[in-house]
Amino acid sequence: MEIISGGGVGVRISEWKDIPVELLMRILSLLDDRTAVVASGVCRGWRDSLSWGITRLSLSWCKKNMNGLVLSLAPKFIKLQSLILRQDIPQLQDDAVEEITIHCHELQELDLSKSFLLTDRSLYAIARGCPNLEKLNISGCSAFGDSALGYLTGCCRKLKFLNLCGCVGTASDRALKSIGYNCNELQYLNLGWCDRVGDEGIKSLAYGCPDLRAIDLCGCVLITDDSVIALANGCLHLRSLGLYYCQNITDRAMYSLAQSRVKGKHEVWASVKNRYEEEQGLTNLNISQCTALTPPAVQALCDSFPALHTCSGRHSLIISGCLNLTSVHCACAVQAHRGSNAMPRLAH
């Protein structure tokens, strides 16, 4: 086969190794993850090109022997920046994670969710081998301890996204203090159902992570108004807050969030942000099962943040299970109600 190069010169190809690097890289960019894995075993040329050309890889499609597959692939894909190893059936073990951290030092995103077989060995290995990590998902990894997570945050200080949902033994106040001290760029944190988390940990987090945009505290039954007040005062860019089943939350927390809207506006002008940021504030809030809240406090919050909607099809203020809050309505729902009442009646 003969192809024409960019300079108009014909190149004869008789073997895979004869394909120009530029063309090979273009071919590889079109492969899905499963095909890329197969291609890595075709020949040395393909393997070398994949090694340098593939930066994102997901092995979530692998339902059997993911551990062996990772052990064989890690030395081949040394330029990976994103690796998704989400599992339905636990397969991954510590030795595979250690192999990843030995070879893939440029990783920025790693998803190990539902890796129930992993232990602290994996977190220590990630800490030592992946200093550029920005996004880590270890949701459901119940065997990790808070000391290992604390060590990891001291090494991976660029973390912006951290999912600890269901990591009951990992997410403690001590771990959150480490996160607040080390991960000042953090923007997203999921602490769902981490029932060891208390006010001290959240306050440390709010103080140390001022750029936090979203935090899910659903099922964190120990937290009180003090946690929400700390977030309202310290995280002025907060957009999404999950408080499902946090039954110690009262009106005091809602009024504090409403007041943060005014403080946030002042910060925008002081730091000369662009004009789009004048619309800062909460866009999602889940207070389902927070049964101590009253309509005036939640309505005050809703009035402060126009992006919170109770209207059909746009629910971003979730109040299910709070029967006493059915009178709370967002701005557009009120306007629609006024509009319908203002319509002229037809004469009979």
Image (cartoon, grey):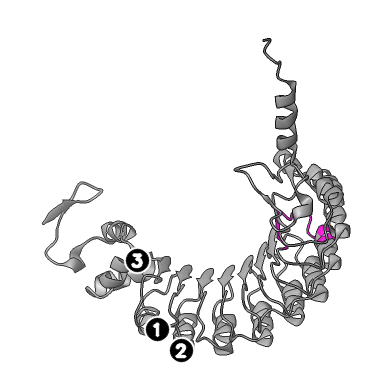
User: Which of the marked residues, 1 or 2, is nearer the chain's N terminus?
Assistant: 1
Q: Secondary structure at mark 3?
A: helix
Residue 17 visible: yes
Mark number, residue 95: 2
Residue 256 horizontal/vertical position (percent) = 87, 55
Which residues fall within the magenta stretch?
232-243
Q: Which residue position is annotated with label 1?
A: 67
| Label 3 to label 2: alpha-carbon separation | 22 Å
In this view, the residue in front, 181 or 145, is 145
Asked whether the beta carbons under mark 1 and mark 2 sit within 8 Å of each other, the answer is yes
- Please name the amino acid that badge 3 sits on: Asp
Q: Which residue is mark 3?
A: 33
Compared across the picture, whether 12 is left or right of 158 comes to left
Q: Looking at the rendering, in which quadrant would you find the C terminus?
A: top right
Whole-angstrom CA distance, mark 1 to mark 2, is 8 Å
Q: Is residue 240 magenta?
A: yes
Left or right: 250, with 94 as reference point: right
- Label 2 secondary element: helix
